[in-house]
Amino acid sequence: MASEGRWIPYPHLLLIAEKLQQIQHGTCTRLIVMMPPRHGKSQFISQYFPAWYLIRNPHKRVILASYEADFASNWGRKARESVERFGHIFGAKIRAESHAASRWEIAGTEGGMMTAGVRGPITGKGMDLGIIDDPVKNDEEAGSETYREKVWDWYLSTFSTRLHKGGSMVVIMTRWHEDDLVG
């Protein structure tokens, strides 16, 4: 979270940072972050973490999904901008022909990031890091048993099957219903 353009290391963000380092090192392979809206979880995990992860591991693949494709693509764009801004310090840069916010690669490698809406097309793609950020948009969707079942089916049949051996998953969400994806 930022105040006047400055990041403030609140205790909950420091704890998340510690867990994300464990994800990057492979000592933690599953992480669930549940917090109310506006606590910095998505900015930290969906924008900065994929950039940092790919700068440190340029050959890895990241897939980020959210309740809608445009929302997920927004995080992809912000992560790409972070790599463009800081990657050169570590020898990583975006492949010149990678312009899409929803799909971009690290130059000279097979690594990169793609985004999709929950239940969206990721068939045929693999990932070393999977991030699901808010699979449910609001209370109305959370209250729909049909929608919850579709999210669960998509997770089991599509998203989780894309994870490479030794890969990690992070699910970020505000809890709207006890029978949601993490429930």
Image (spheres, rainbow, N blue to C red):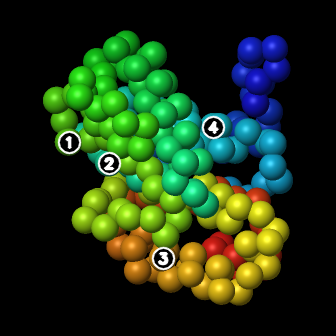
Residue drawn at the location 28% of the way across and 60% of the way down: 125
Q: Position of residue 48 (x, y in %)?
A: 55, 33
Q: Which picture quadrant has residue 104?
A: top left
Q: Is residue 92 above or below residue 56?
A: above
> Type of residue at label 2?
Arg
For the C terminus, give its image quadrant.
bottom right
> Type of residue at label 1?
Glu
Q: Earlier in the sequence, mark 2 or mark 4?
A: 4
* Few, some or many residues within 10 Å of mark 2 (<14, 14–19, 20+): many
* Residue 61 numbered tag: 2
Q: According to the image, label 4 marks what residue?
A: 44
Q: Is residue 87 above or below residue 100?
A: above
Q: Earlier in the sequence, mark 2 or mark 1?
A: 2
Residue drawn at the location 32% of the way across and 48% of the way down: 61
Residue drawn at the location 69% of the way across and 44% of the way down: 41
* Residue 154 numbered tag: 3
Kindly tell me whether residue 156 is visible in this rendering.
Answer: yes
In terms of secondary structure, where does tag 1 sit?
A: loop
* Few, some or many residues within 10 Å of mark 4 (<14, 14–19, 20+): some
What's the CA distance linking mark 3 and mark 2? Answer: 20 Å
User: In front of the other: label 1 or label 3?
Assistant: 3
What's the CA distance linking mark 2 and mark 1? Answer: 8 Å
In terms of secondary structure, where does tag 4 sit?
A: helix
In terms of secondary structure, where does tag 2 sit?
A: strand
What's the CA distance linking mark 1 and mark 3? Answer: 25 Å
Q: According to the image, label 1 marks what residue?
A: 110
Q: Dots 2 and 1: beta carbons under 8 Å?
A: yes
Q: Position of residue 130 (x, y in %)?
A: 45, 57
Q: Earlier in the sequence, mark 3 or mark 2?
A: 2
Q: Position of residue 74 (x, y in %)?
A: 55, 39
Instruction: Report whether 54 appears left or right of 28.
Output: left
